Structures are given as C-alpha cells and as structure tokens.
C-alpha cells in the first residue's frame, strides 16, 4: 500500500513510519491521520512486525494540526476531524505491539498529542515540545488535556496548556514527557536499538503488559490490580512462559514464539 503523507519500511521485525509532509513540517490533516490509521491496522495484522517506530525526520516530528485546513471549519467539520485524530491515536495507543516515538525538531499541538499516544518517547537535542493551541483561540483536542496530565501531572499539564509555552527536550525529560534525550544524529539508531530490544521480548507478555497499563489508567486501583492478577495468571497458559522460565534455569537466551 502506498501513501500520500507517510513513508513506511520494515527493518527486520521493526516497522518504521515516517510522517512525510516536509513542506508543512508534517502538520496533521485528515489525509495524514486517515492514512496513519490505515497503516496501523496493516501493522497490527502483520505478525512479522514486533515493534514500531514513528518519526518525522530531523526538522519536525509534527508541527501541530494543519491550520490552513482547520481555519474555516465549522463545529461539525472540526468534530469530524478531531474524532479521526482520536481514532488514529487510540489505534497507536492500543496497538498490541510497542510503539516508540523518535522526536526531533518540532512536536507541537497535535504532534505532541501523537507522540503521547506512543508507548516510549525519545527526543533529539534541540527538540521543541508543547501545546500552543491556546494561542490560536482553541485548546488541545487530540488527547492533550487527558494524556498530558496523566503523563506529567496536572501542574505541568496546566502550565503547558494554559500558557502555550513550549519546552525543550531536557525539560521534557525532567518532567517525564520523554524518557531519553540523545544527539540528533543518534536518534534513529537509539530508537532502533530500543525497538530491537523490545522485539526480542515475549510478544504475548508484551501485549498483556501494555493492556494492563492502559486499562489501569482509566480505572480505580483495586480494579486495575484484579485485572493484572487475572492477566498475569493467563500468561502461564502460554508456551513463551514455559520457554522463558526454562531458559532462565538453563542459563541461556530464551527463544519466544508468541504462543
């Protein structure tokens, strides 16, 4: 499948998605979000892919929503677009495979929200991250008011959203918005290193761990703990659990089959 706004390649068992609207600093419009959702569906069905990287190149991960596209939208068109954004980002958040955001340049507005839908975020030095929507007379709508507060706490979320002021990569690291900052020239190598490490883990356990974390963020602690208990017990019905523990006792590297 060919895409107008995306590039996609496979490096072994890693899927690499590159947002590809360089003239517009990868600003998010309906075509990009629809294509991204379609590609995520394709990856979900591809058993060869064990981990995913989403990037935007060296100048911009995504500079936000496409303002020219949104300018004259009425409330119905606006809701249709933001519903599409939610649908696509939710697909990424719930993909049963780990997703790494490799962020460089600008990650503003919808770009920051797209990155927050990923499981792990690493940023290049010099990256600018923020939610500047307040300066446009709107607010974050693609998950920013919800995911940002869950990631960095209400205080930082309100400061970033209320002021619209961006932060640099080191500040993003200090508040937990990203987990690592690396030189720009090392960004993709680091992302691939992490992706290859994750791709070598037990696929079912990885999927269940992601499901537990996601579920736990929306329920009370006792419900989350019970879900974890049942999910953990389920893993003892898998061949991967037997292989992992047997390999540990035999002091060798496990060979997981995803079964």
Image (cartoon, rainbow, N blue to C red):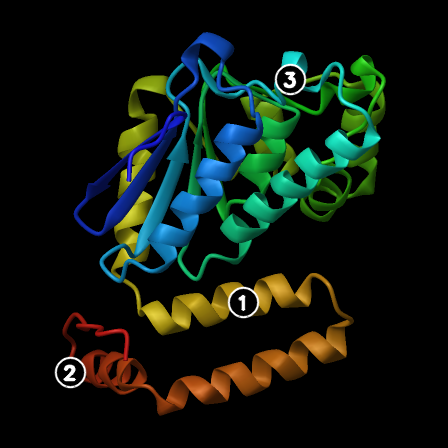
Q: Position of residue 245 (x, y in %)?
A: 27, 83
Per the image, the residue denoted by label 3 is 69
Vertical side of 32 occupied by 147: above or below:
below
**Which mark is in front, 3 or 2?**
3
Query: Disc 2 versus disc 1: distance between alpha carbons?
Result: 30 Å
Per the image, the residue denoted by label 1 is 211
The numbered disc on residue 137 is: none
Residue at 53% in and 58% down:
94
Query: Is residue 245 among what the camera can see?
Result: yes
**Which mark is in front, 1 or 3?**
3
Pick the front one: 207 or 85:
85
Q: In the image, is 136 to the left or to the right of 173?
A: right
Pick the front one: 205 or 144:
144
Is the C-beta separation of discs 1 and 3 under 8 Å?
no
Residue at 66% in and 25% down:
109
Q: Secondary structure at mark 2?
A: loop
């Amino acid at each position: 499948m060919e895409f107008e706004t995306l590039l996609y390649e496979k490096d072994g068992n890693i899927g690499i998605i590159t947002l590809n609207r360089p003239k517009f600093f990868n600003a998010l419009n309906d075509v990009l979000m629809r294509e991204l959702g379609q590609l995520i569906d394709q990856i979900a069905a591809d058993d060869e892919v064990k981990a995913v990287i989403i990037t935007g190149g060296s100048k911009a991960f995504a500079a936000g929503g496409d303002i020219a596209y949104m300018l004259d939208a009425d409330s119905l068109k606006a809701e249709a677009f933001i519903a599409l954004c939610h649908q696509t980002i939710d697909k990424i958040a719930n993909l049963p495979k780990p997703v790494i955001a490799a962020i460089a340049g600008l990650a503003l507005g919808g770009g920051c929200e797209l990155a927050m839908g990923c499981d792990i975020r690493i940023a290049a030095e010099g990256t600018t991250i923020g939610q500047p929507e307040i300066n446009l007379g709107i607010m974050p709508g693609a998950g920013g008011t919800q995911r940002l507060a869950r990631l960095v706490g209400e205080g930082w979320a309100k400061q970033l959203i209320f002021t619209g002021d961006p932060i640099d990569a080191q500040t993003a690291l200090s508040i937990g918005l990203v987990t690592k900052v690396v030189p720009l020239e090392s960004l993709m190598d680091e992302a691939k290193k992490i992706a290859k490490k994750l791709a070598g883990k037990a696929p079912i356990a990885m999927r269940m761990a992601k499901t537990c974390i996601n579920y736990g963020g929306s329920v009370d602690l006792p419900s989350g703990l019970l879900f974890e208990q049942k999910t953990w017990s389920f893993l003892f019905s898998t061949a991967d659990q037997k292989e992992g523990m047997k390999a540990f006792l035999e002091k060798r590297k496990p060979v997981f089959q995803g079964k």
